[in-house]
Amino acid sequence: MNLRTIDKRVMVLGDGETAVRLSKALNTSGLDSYLLWAGGTPPEGIPEGIAVELSARLVALQGQVGDFTATILSSDQFIRKLAGSVMVAFESRTEPVFDVATAPMHEGVATLEDAEAILRGERQISGDVKTVVFLDRLDGASTPASSERQFNAILSFLDRGIKCYAIGCQMKVASRNLELLYGRARDGGCVFFKNDFLSISFTQGRPLIRFEDLILHEEKEICADMVILAENFMPGASLPELREILGVETDKAGFMQADNVLRLPLQTNRRGVFVVGPSRAPVTRWDLDQEIPAAVSQVKELFAWAESFPYEEVISFDIDACARCLTCFRSCPHGAIHFTNRPNFLALACQQCGICTAFCPNEAIELRDMEKDRIKGLIANERKGSDSAPVVVFACEKSGARILNSIPSEDTLLRRIRWIQLPCGGTLRTQYLLDAIGNASEIPERVMVLACHEDNCRSGMGTIKARATVERVKSFLDSVGWNQTKIEFISTASNEAERIRKLLAAS
Amino acid sequence: MAQNRDSILVVGSGVAGLSASMSLARQGYNCILVEKAGSLGGHAAGYTCKAINGKCQKCGACLVDDLLARFGDFPEIQVFLETRIDRIERKKKGFTASLNGKYGLKDINCGAILLATGFKPFDPNEKSNLCFSSIPNMITAVELEAMLRDKELPYRPSDGRQPETIAFVQCVGSRDPKRGHPYCSQVCCGYALRMAGRLRDLAPKTKITFFFMDIQTFGRSFSQRWASLQQDFIWINEIPGDYFVSDGDRVGVSVEVEDEIVDLSFDMMVLSVGMTPTDDQLTYQQMLDLSMSSEGFMLPDEDRGVFVVGSASGPMSIEKSITDAAGSATRVIAYMEGAR
């Protein structure tokens, strides 16, 4: 087999423990890692053999898996580095759960981070602390990652003989061994209260907390020496800029992985760019312990895949039809188009969704085996069949087509439908829908597009685009008064066979 | 791709076993996948899509279909369906496992073992106060998953009618140290709320009540969605103690509301059952001399070539099983490289 030459160096971006652990794990498994370190002083515990670039910031990343070129700003100098893969592994920021902590901070109120500094001996407690109240979010939406920190701090305070109370709305214990940690804190003497509202005042310099215990329905009052506020995990400060540079999706909170199960475990929309640990989501210790070795497997699997990827064009491009409008470059969800004086299609980055082919105003781009003439032929041929069907379906290979493929061939339902498999809903062109109606000897009753549910599209926006295409054609047909064919967009998943069967049978 | 190396035995073909064996195969290792059932995919292959109004709810159930579709690219993974492992013998180097099943008896050699044997949904008959077997319209959430997957809509086992009122009882067999389940099963709040949302989407008039202790955060957008979830359903912060048949075929419970005992009844009740160790766990523990974790699941013995992946090691979501499988693959490979 003729293997591609793949650069197997991994560039790790980070500013803390995650990046250090990740670099070491990559190194141990035989991959060269290169650490792009945000800080000015080198991290501790980096073995020889791992190159570290200090005060370094990524400013551009071009290329594809196995062949990335990174432009880095390091101590006011631009440098270029080559790498086969990039891993984002920044720590998260923390933010106290209540604004009571914002200015002016009362000396009796500390954040969990302050408390951890006290426990590490880096900060002194002023005065004699005998009673501490831990305050969690009261809206019930805390995370296991943040309660894990809280439980650990409670246990350390209990160890020092300090009386602990904890007030929260819904204790989060949904992670490995977390319920046991919670139990240890409770059995160790910490009193937990469930509550969703409280007031804090200060009497003689000490915080006084009043609330109603929701379990026993009693008014409670605790006068403490110190109140410790739980903290939410927020995306690291460098992520907003970095996601623009890398062109990768984020979730609603700004963590650098879309809320899309197809990105699991550590992938982004850009093949070869991974995101690990607190850059990806708020994680517990256990989560991080799994994610670091998982990152090693993920990148090794990807390199092996890239090495054996055939040297064949997956895209055909008509340079004479191209208007250099940049639409393809802007619409590609996978960073697979590099624009020079023309689009260049990066074979290893392309996920063959066909979105660029459907967006291109001049139809200058075609996905191999999905050329418009072939699709038109499929539509026409299907329509000319001896028992022409009243229903024409365009189905995404990941959802709708899997369902249709699972229908046994003897099922009479299949006689009523003709279907065309697309690699993604995003491949659908307006013209295909019109062809399905117009190029037919017999006009179909229904034209259906079966694509994935929103947020479950491999290409992120493919299914949204398919829906928009269907809506556009519908309103066009409405405007010309065409009512013989019902055009529908239906989102689905491979495990919804029953629902789709019913919808198809209803025609 | 296959090199001159020992194979790796993967036991169980659920999300974790499939993911791990494909990860190992992609990294050039031979795998032998043994599954006691007649098909691949494990529990999740029977779960329903929980999308609401065309929007994915991120339960991950469809990822099994993705894994199975990709599994076709790995003809080199040897698969033994309807097969159990009778014996495992430790050799000077590696193991010999005696397989027993559909293809007869067969001894295979392997360099490492990955136990991806999964979990058992908590059996509500273990909690006698639920009276599970004598209340016809009380079902487990696993049964609801199958019902929605196979029939799209819920129906009452007693008469096949669609229920108008449904109650979910959370933490059944979880957070229960007295019965040996001193852990949160991590997945039940997620699946129950997602299915409840789906039920409301399919049949908007359905009234849904939740009996709960603490709702656990699930998914990335929980904090934004929690407020509206509180509006969508009726919430009772208590797990009922008594369960009974009411009005002939309804499900009744007694709960304490403001210091008074009140009886409530529903057309159907869904028990959000937790994850418990499988019945096979003890056998593997004995065969391979493994200890038990403080949560009651199997602990690996990685220094001696035995790895435990996915929910066989403790309650875990589909999402976490995928991560865990990839992570385990790295550890298995490190072991195999060291053992060579």
Image (cartoon, coloured by chain):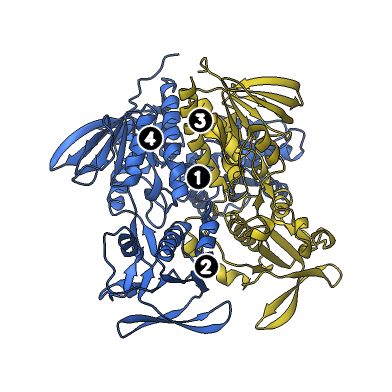
Chain colours: A blue, B yellow
Disc 3 is placed on an element classified as: helix
Whether label 2 touches label 3, CB < 8 Å: no
The residue to which callout 3 is attached is: B332
Q: Position of residue A316 (x, y in %)?
A: 41, 27
What's the amino acid at mark 3?
A: Val
Location of residue A364 by image quarter: top left
- The reply to whether label 2 and label 3 mark residues of one chain is no
Residue at 45% in and 58% down = A148
For the residue carrying disc 4, how many other residues have a C-alpha within 10 Å: few (<14), some (14-19), or many (20+)? Answer: some
Kindly state the secondary structure of the residue where label 2 is placed.
loop
Task: Name the residue beneath numbered marker 2.
Answer: A170
- What chain does badge 1 belong to? A
Q: Earlier in the sequence, mark 4 or mark 1?
A: 4
| Residue picked out by circle 4 | A25
Residue that label 1 marks: A457
First in sequence, mark 2 or 4: give its number.
Answer: 4
* Vertical arrangement, residue B135 with respect to residue A65, above or below: below
